[in-house]
Amino acid sequence: MHSAIDDTRCGDTAFKSSMREQWDYAAAGWNAHAADIRAWLRQPTEAMFRMAGVKTGSRVLDVAAGAGDQTLAIAQQVGPQGYVLATDLSPAIVAMARDNAARAGLAQVETRVADGEDLGVAEASFDAAVCRLGLMLFPDPLRGLREMRKALRPGGGACTMVFSRPEKNPCIAILMATALKHAGLPARDPFVAGGLLSLGRPGHIDALYRSAGFQDVATSALDAVFHMPSVDHYIAFVRRSASPILQILGGLDGAAAEGAWSEMRDQLMVFTTPHGWAGPNELLLTAGRRPGEKA
Ligand SMILES: C[S@@+](CC[C@H](N)C(=O)[O-])C[C@H]1O[C@@H](n2cnc3c(N)ncnc32)[C@H](O)[C@@H]1O
């Protein structure tokens, strides 16, 4: 595992190489937890497809697609006459998306390693574009949204899912603050670009959509409780797949890192219920349309 970087001093290139490296490392863990992630995000994901206008036969662009969990759901929705292009910065996670699609027999899925800020797809070639829990990790999310808008045909719809503000996502806030403290790093402004909660400031993402040239922009906030059998199951998920936290702890030796995980576990115990562990999250689903013909 690489050591922690001070991302406030890094240019985009260093930031992106570090992001790619982090997700190459966390890819197997994210993929292994696909069923938990699917259960957590089921309703918001269905809403995201509706808001982007995904239909039978649609050509859909999936940005920051990860191991392709939502890609496979899109492929089922568009059917064999449709098409989904799953793109992601991390070659390791894209390879998993490709394998998952092949194993599911979904020939309408293609995969490509691509930076969401520089997609390299033909202009106006998609009916819909989605990005599930990816855009907030871009150093320049406006560029990412411009790329999505350009890829859409006139009238085509985009929808992104990001975390809202820290108070509504206390587990992430606890993980970040505790990891930074144990790594000896100063507290971070949660709204600095590229962070997990960076697009959560009310109104910010709508303004970015408008600047990127979308119209009919609207955001809905949705609760998405992460249910796990126990806090230990949640910590096990974070330890294998939450690359931003792993990156912060990357410079610590084994004992120091264990101290951090133990404190995170203690703090997150507060979300234990009689029926298991239930971590609150709030997501923002933002939709917009490329100006032109009606969808
Ligand atoms: C939290 S995961 C979400 C993956 C998937 N969308 C899902 O919901 O299962 C975030 C993904 O964003 C990708 N990512 C981060 N920065 C990116 C960028 N600049 N361009 C494309 N993908 C990026 C990571 O490689 C990772 O796969």
Image (cartoon, grey):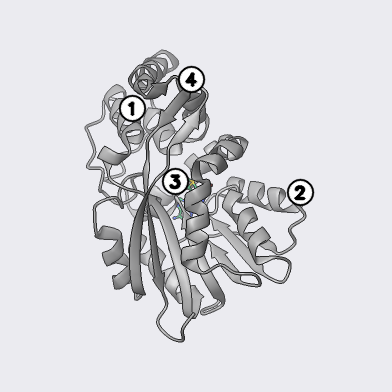
> In terms of secondary structure, where does tag 4 sit?
helix
- Pointers 2 and 4 in contact (CB under 8 A)? no
The numbered mark, 1 or 3, whose residue comes first in the sequence reads: 3
> In terms of secondary structure, where does tag 3 sit?
helix
Residue 238 image position (x, y, % from top left): 47, 30
Query: On the image, numbered disc 1 is attached to which residue?
Result: 179
The numbered mark, 4 or 3, whose residue comes first in the sequence reads: 3
| Image position of 243 with respect to 86: above or below | above
The numbered mark, 2 or 4, whose residue comes first in the sequence reads: 2
Mark nearest the camera among 1 and 2 is 2
Mark yes or no: residue 104 visible: yes
Q: Amino acid at mark 2?
A: Arg
Q: Residue at x 50, y 66 (%)?
A: 129
Q: Residue at x 56, y 43 (%)?
A: 38
Q: What's the distance in space between the residues labelled 1 and 3, CA to CA?
A: 17 Å
Query: In the picture provided, is 118 more to the left or to the right than 69?
Result: left
Rendering quarter of residue 161: bottom left
Q: Amino acid at mark 4?
A: Asp
